[in-house]
Image (cartoon, helix red, strand yellow):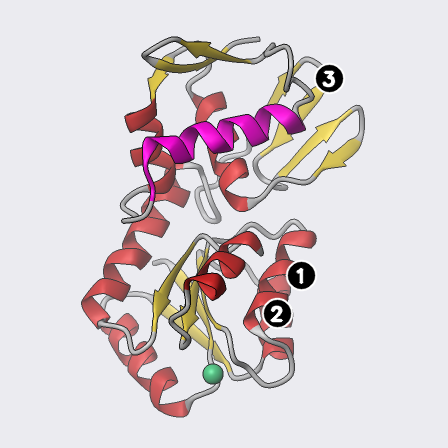
């Protein structure tokens, strides 16, 4: 039974979310402020975090960034009351995986939750019991710890880069089309296109130190990408 941590301060929203999520078979835990919410996320394993932005104590952006800095890669779905796209983008930059604007439609929210859980299950998130460590060149990529290391040094990855690398490594030496990567790593998100894949591949290459001479991530012209090495 997937466990969801709800970090939200409005009692009405807390109750609506808990009732509905429990009815859908999820286990839920609620924290009403940013500091306690972050603490709970650090101390206990969750499959997903629903994170409000405007919170007492510490705002959702900071909570998310702090968790990512601590290498806690639990999927985060931001609940944003503000509609401006700047906020949305900021949230995703802090390492959130997706967002839903308030007031949200419960059906939409549930679909996003399912999509995120599916994606993280695909990547072996909490509870799957899989322990996987990939090695290539000087790098080790530890899924359990959620870390990429080069000769013992941690290389910071954003949530999407993490999922992208995980997907590439799980399908090492396979030719992967942009569409497939988009579907598997991003799932359904209205604003993404295959160009998004190219942008993230470029960022990942940079972090792997291969911005000029691709060594691990090969571009297969007109077809997609392949991770070799
Ligand atoms: Ca709030």
Label 3 vs 2, first from the N-terminus: 2
220 vs 193, left or right, is right
CA gap between label 3 and label 2 equals 33 Å
Q: Residues within 10 Å of mark 3 (few under 14, many from 20)?
A: few
* Majority SS type along the magenta span: helix
Image quarter for residue 149? top right
In the rendered image, the quadrant that contains the N terminus is bottom left
Q: Which residues are magenta?
A: 192-207
38 relative to 22 in the view: left or right: right
Q: How far apart, in angstroms, are the residues tagged by discs 1 and 2? A: 8 Å
Which of these two is toward me, 210 or 50? 210
User: Residue 106 in the image: x percent, y percent?
Assistant: 22, 71
Q: Is residue 14 magenta?
A: no
Q: CA distance from mark 3 to mark 1?
A: 27 Å
Q: Write down the residue under mark 2.
A: 38
Find residue 192 and report its horizontal and vertical position in percent.
Answer: 34, 42
Against 82, residue 125 (above or below) is: above
| Between discs 1 and 2, the one toward the N terminus | 2
Q: Which residue is mark 1?
A: 66
């Amino acid at each position: 039974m997937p466990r969801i941590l709800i970090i939200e301060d409005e009692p009405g929203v807390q109750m609506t979310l808990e009732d509905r999520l429990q009815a859908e078979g999820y286990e839920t835990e609620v924290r009403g402020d940013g500091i306690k919410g972050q603490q709970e996320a650090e101390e206990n394993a969750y499959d997903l975090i629903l994170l409000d932005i405007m919170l007492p104590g510490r705002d959702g952006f900071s909570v998310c960034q702090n968790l990512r800095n601590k290498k806690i890669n639990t999927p985060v779905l931001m609940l944003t009351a503000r509609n401006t796209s700047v906020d949305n983008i900021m949230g995703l930059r802090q390492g959130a995986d997706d967002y839903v604007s308030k007031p949200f439609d419960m059906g939409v929210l549930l679909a996003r939750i399912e999509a995120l859980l599916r994606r993280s299950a695909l990547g072996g998130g909490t509870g799957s019991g899989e322990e996987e460590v990939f090695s290539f060149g000087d790098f080790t990529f530890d899924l359990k710890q959620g870390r990429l290391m080069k000769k013992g040094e941690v290389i910071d990855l954003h949530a999407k880069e993490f999922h992208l690398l995980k997907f590439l490594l799980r399908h090492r030496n396979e030719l992967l089309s942009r569409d497939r990567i988009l579907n598997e790593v991003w799932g359904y998100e209205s604003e993404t296109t295959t160009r998004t894949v190219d942008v993230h591949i470029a960022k990942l290459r940079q972090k792997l130190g291969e911005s000029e001479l691709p060594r691990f991530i090969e571009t297969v012209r007109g077809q997609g990408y392949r991770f070799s090495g």
